[in-house]
Image (cartoon, rainbow, N blue to C red):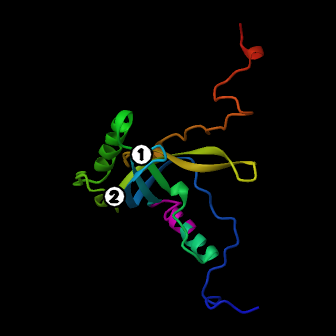
Amino acid sequence: MQKPANWDTVEAICGGGKRLTPGGHVCKIVSAAEQTSRTGKQMLVLAFDIDGGEFDGYFMNLYNRNVQAQHSDAKWPNSGVYRQLTEGDSAGYFKGMLVNIEKSNPGYKWDWNEQSLKGKRFGGVFREEEYQANDGSIKTRIACIAVREVEGIEDIIAPGTKKLAQSGAPAGYIPDEQIPF
């Protein structure tokens, strides 16, 4: 076996890293891009990182680990990406997101140039969510579900875990024998 060229300088990855907690975290936008959703709707996609505190640089650390582990073009961690639809019924949420970014960055005014968002801060609301892994098992991840103002974000109470619907039944389904009347 041949010793890798960067063996003496590469940091060992032994697992056991800290997992991001649900609740509020100050975030900084790494990149922003207008994209089209799978259903053909316009959306703004923000790649972000945690800015300060116990989890400072959390997503950059994950990204760097992926680059080292894969030796390829690793992608920014999906849990460090926020997608906001921009049209129709979602326009009010889009506008609210931008207002919260403006409030979090004194002197900044949204100018319809998504590149101007790079480096801007916002308050991210994170919750735990269940998902079905490729092997069929149920796992959890921490996801940003809302963009709020930075001020007071760390005092936000963590939203409850978003559970997967069981056995193909729609979320909120209650079997007839459990109805209390």
Q: Amino acid at mark 1?
A: Gln
Residue 22 pos. (x, y %): 56, 47
Measuring 48% from the left and 55% from the top, which residue is drawn there? 81
- Between disc 1 and disc 2, the foreground one is 1
Q: Amino acid at mark 2?
A: Lys
Check disc 2 and report the residue beneath it: 120
* Range of magenta residues: 52-62
Left or right of 131 in this view: 152: left
The C terminus lies in quadrant: top right
Left or right of 162 in this view: 14: right
Q: Which one is nearer the viewer's eye here, 93 or 14?
A: 93
Q: Which mark is residue 84?
A: 1
Q: Which one is nearer the viewer's eye here, 100 or 66?
A: 66
Cβ atoms under marks 1 and 2 closer than 8 Å: no
Q: Which mark is residue 34?
A: none
Where on the picture, by quarter, is residue 121?
Answer: bottom left
Where on the picture, by quarter, is residue 165?
Answer: top right
Residue 41 pos. (x, y %): 41, 43
Residue 113 pos. (x, y %): 26, 56
- Label 2 sits on a secondary structure element that is loop
**Badge 1 density bin: few <14, some 14–19, many ≥20, Cα 10 Å:** many
Residue 110 seen from this side: yes
**Badge 2 density bin: few <14, some 14–19, many ≥20, Cα 10 Å:** some
Measuring 38% from the left and 49% from the top, which residue is drawn there? 150
Q: Is residue 37 magenta?
A: no
